[in-house]
Image (cartoon, helix red, strand yellow):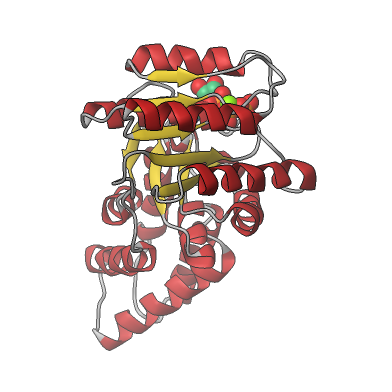
Amino acid sequence: MGFWDKLKKITGSVFGTAISEEDEAFFEDLEEMLIMADVGMTTATEAVERLRKVMVQEKISGQEPVKEALRSILAEMLTMEDQELHISTRPSVILVVGVNGVGKTTSIGKLAARLKGEGKRVLLCAGDTFRAAAADQLEIWANRCGCEIVRQHEGADPGAVLFDALQAAKARGVDVVICDTAGRLHNKSNLMAELHKLRKIIDRETPDADLETLLVLDATTGQNGLIQAKQFQETAGCTGIILTKLDGTAKGGIVIAIARELGVPVKFVGLGEGIRDMQPFDAREYVNAII
Ligand SMILES: Nc1nc2c(ncn2[C@@H]2O[C@H](COP(=O)(O)OP(=O)(O)OP(=O)(O)O)[C@@H](O)[C@H]2O)c(=O)[nH]1
Ligand SMILES: [Mg+2]
């Protein structure tokens, strides 16, 4: 069962009970349901409080009207500016970061395919020189999407690969450079420092380029994703989030927690392993799907 179905089931059971505005049990169930879905304690409490107010003020009762009110509240809490990618310069740079195995390389492949489809010339930079076969994996995606790749040998300095990629992009008139990076733990300071270096190289080689730093988070990691996001935000200054593996979890509520508590917009969601399994994040659609 996918994420949407599971969460539909949870909300179904909540809304299956009779609703009146004094029904404390309902509000408690609802809050619990939101916390279970990883919305986060603060956000769950806030959403329920807002709903309670709206129900009383606007005298809302009955399953559908209450659901609709909750949808509006959550969508409003989730809607952020800057959900679009800002990549209008030539070249523009997208730096993709995150812990091990969250889906960075796969998301780069999907993103490259999407940008290719919009008619852009895309170059992938194999900045993960640490893991064996990481560059091979990226090259498979490059071939699949029909875009270029700059890579070096295993163990090479990621900064040197990025430097090469940016030079190549400038020389060839590439629209977007997407840079893969090695998975790193958010609490390993030397690896985090390496991200700083990559940022510096981009600032130096392409000072006028639009830069997006996208943090990839695995939706199945739940609240730990929020901790990771905070750390990466401090070190790398993320401009957006790609939330992956939403197809495998009922815990997609982390989207709401991150948007609320970090102020970083979720730009894309990953819904599978295939090349087309990534969509721009749409708050209203997302909320409609879960409730
Ligand atoms: N179901 C599902 N699987 C995904 C999604 N995104 C990535 N994966 C899978 O997750 C696994 C890890 O993906 P990678 O792209 O290699 O992750 P990574 O972050 O680059 O990993 P490292 O380079 O080792 O840090 C692969 O098996 C992917 O197919 C998604 O949205 N849904
Ligand atoms: Mg990878």
- Nearest the eye: 252 or 226: 226
238 lies above or below 214: below
Instruction: Residue at 72%, 20% (x, y): give it.
Output: 155
Rendered image quadrant of residue 2: top left
Instruction: Residue at 60%, 17% (x, y): give it.
Output: 152
Of all residues, the one furthest to the front in this rendering is: 171
75 lies above or below 278: below
Image coordinates of residue 88 in percent, x first then y, are 28, 46
42 lies above or below 190: below
Of all residues, the one furthest to the bottom in this rendering is: 57
Image coordinates of residue 151 in percent, x first then y, are 55, 18
Quadrant the N terminus occupies: top left
- Nearest the eye: 241 or 20: 241
- Nearest the eye: 161 or 256: 161
Rendered image quadrant of residue 65: bottom left
Rendered image quadrant of residue 226: bottom right
- Name the quadrant where ligand 1 sits: top right
Instruction: Residue at 36%, 13% (x, y): give it.
Output: 144
In the visual, does 227 lie left or right of 60? Answer: right
Image coordinates of residue 78 in percent, x first then y, are 38, 62
- Nearest the eye: 120 or 30: 120
Instruction: Residue at 48%, 14% (x, y): give it.
Output: 139
In the visual, does 161 lie left or right of 264? Answer: right
In the visual, does 160 lie left or right of 174? Answer: right
Residue 188 visible to the viewer: no
Residue 22 visible to the viewer: yes
Image coordinates of residue 45 in percent, x first then y, are 51, 72
167 lies above or below 149: below
Quadrant the C terminus occupies: bottom left
How many numbered discs sit on the rendered protein? 0
